[in-house]
């Protein structure tokens, strides 16, 4: 009996129980885009810590000076909140190119309602309602009517574009100013704390909730995910609603920074988000490779590139040109399937 027990105790572990050894090559292959994205951010951080001073001879041009760093955080705040919210949509392989005009209309309506009702809360509630209605439209048309998500967002973009013209051009108004004081939301410390909290919320939703798992499954294989119980229509609508709420938060910080709203404040955000996510290593097709790290690293790099080139006194038109070259390079490198020459 003792011999039997001894033999049982010496029985080797099964392959499933054996611990897997860390394989550096597999890790690099599975996380190549993330490694490149983080490396690109660190490279930009090192370069722009010294290059502006070397080119201009002004030590105040470096990104570590308080004024420059505060400006950097101001840009990162709105960009990162938008990118975190967009992650839920892009994880499904979808996109929304109406973001800029949505934010523009939301900020304008928020100011008008807050000024008229003398209440910031009521203004935010109305902005959230707008975001939820847009989310239901995007989710419903894509899942039920089978309309491509790009088309539904184009419809919204044209609608809000016309609404912006009515609010500004037709009324002969250049901008709207918020009468209530929300300057407390403009402090660097408050912005950083808010970004950390929102990033943690986004990470938890994407990694540990049914919604996060379902949207990534839909991006990986829409039909298989639907058959497995991902509830395609419901998941799409909830994902877009989450995106809409993040849009409202980003809009609030934008208004806090500018003190008002104008027609061209947010018009470029729709393309900025796509560039930031790609710079962070996120695939356009979404799926299981979607990570919140993509949004965070891409945002930090994109804003750092803008601030750094500006501090180097590069002409604004050249900055757009440089961003376009980087965007094309990233698309060509990260969005190809084996054996194909064009992005998917």
Image (cartoon, grey):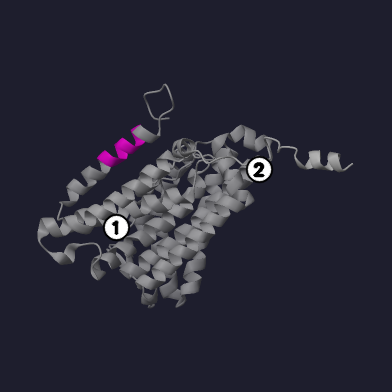
Q: Position of residue 297 (x, y in %)?
A: 39, 51
Which residue is depicted at the point 63% across and 47% down?
234
Mark 1, Cα crowd under 10 Å, few <14 / some 14-19 / many 20+, is: few
Hey, which quadrant is residue 194 in on the image? Answer: bottom left
Name the residue: 45% across, 58% down: 247
Q: Is residue 301 above or below residue 330?
A: below
Please say if 53 is above or below 28: below
Q: How many marks?
A: 2
Q: Quadrant of the N terminus?
A: top right
Check disc 1 and report the residue beneath it.
169
Task: Please tell me whether mark 1 sits on a helix, a strand or a loop.
Answer: loop
Q: Nearer the viewer, residue 139 or 46?
A: 46
Task: Give how far across and how far down residue 332 sits, in percent.
Answer: 34, 32
Q: Main secondary structure of the magenta part?
A: helix
The answer to whether 31 appears left or right of 169 in the picture is right
Measure the alpha-carbon separation of dots 2 and 1.
43 Å
Extreme-front residue of the structure? 3
- Front label number (2 vs 1): 2
What span is in magenta? 325-332
Mark closest to the chain's N terminus, 2 or 1: 1
Q: Quadrant of residue 312?
A: bottom left
Q: Is residue 40 left or right of residue 95?
A: left
Q: Note whether residue 278 is visible.
A: no
Mark drawn on residue 330: none
Q: Nearer the viewer, residue 268 or 1?
A: 1
- 108 or 169, nearer to the observer: 108
1, 52: nearer the viewer? 1
Pointer 2: what residue?
Answer: 231
Position of the C terminus by quadrant: top left
Q: Assess disc 2: are there few (<14), some (14-19) or many (≥20) residues with their C-alpha within 10 Å of its C-alpha.
A: some
């Amino acid at each position: 009996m003792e011999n039997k027990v001894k033999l049982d105790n010496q029985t080797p572990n099964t392959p499933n129980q054996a611990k897997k050894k860390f394989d550096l090559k597999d890790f690099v292959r599975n996380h190549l885009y993330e490694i490149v994205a983080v490396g690109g951010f660190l490279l930009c951080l090192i370069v722009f810590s010294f290059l502006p001073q070397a080119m201009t001879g002004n030590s105040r041009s470096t990104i570590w000076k308080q004024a420059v760093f505060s400006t950097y955080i101001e840009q990162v705040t709105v960009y990162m909140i938008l990118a975190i919210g967009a992650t839920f949509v892009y994880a499904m392989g979808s996109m929304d190119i109406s973001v800029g005009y949505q934010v523009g209309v939301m900020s304008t309506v928020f100011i008008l309602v807050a000024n008229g009702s003398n209440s910031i809360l009521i203004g935010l509630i109305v902005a959230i309602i707008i975001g939820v209605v847009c989310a239901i439209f995007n989710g419903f048309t894509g899942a039920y009517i089978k309309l491509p998500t790009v088309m539904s967002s184009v419809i919204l973009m044209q609608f809000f574009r016309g609404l912006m013209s009515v609010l500004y051009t037709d009324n002969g108004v250049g901008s709207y100013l918020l009468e209530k004081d929300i300057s407390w939301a403009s402090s660097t410390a408050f912005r950083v704390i808010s970004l950390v909290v929102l990033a943690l919320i986004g990470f938890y939703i994407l990694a540990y909730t049914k919604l996060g798992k379902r949207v990534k499954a839909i991006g990986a294989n829409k039909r298989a995910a639907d058959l497995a119980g991902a509830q395609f229509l419901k998941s799409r609508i909830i994902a877009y609603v989450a995106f809409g709420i993040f849009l409202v938060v980003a809009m609030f910080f934008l208004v806090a920074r500018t003190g008002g709203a104008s027609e061209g404040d947010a018009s470029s955000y729709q393309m900025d988000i796509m560039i930031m996510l790609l710079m962070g290593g996120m695939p356009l097709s979404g799926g299981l490779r979607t990570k919140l790290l993509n949004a965070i690293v891409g945002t930090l790099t994109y804003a750092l590139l803008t601030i750094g080139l500006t501090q180097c006194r590069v002409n604004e038109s050249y900055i757009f040109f440089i961003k376009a070259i980087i965007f094309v390079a990233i698309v060509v490198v990260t969005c190809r399937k084996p054996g194909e020459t064009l992005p998917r």
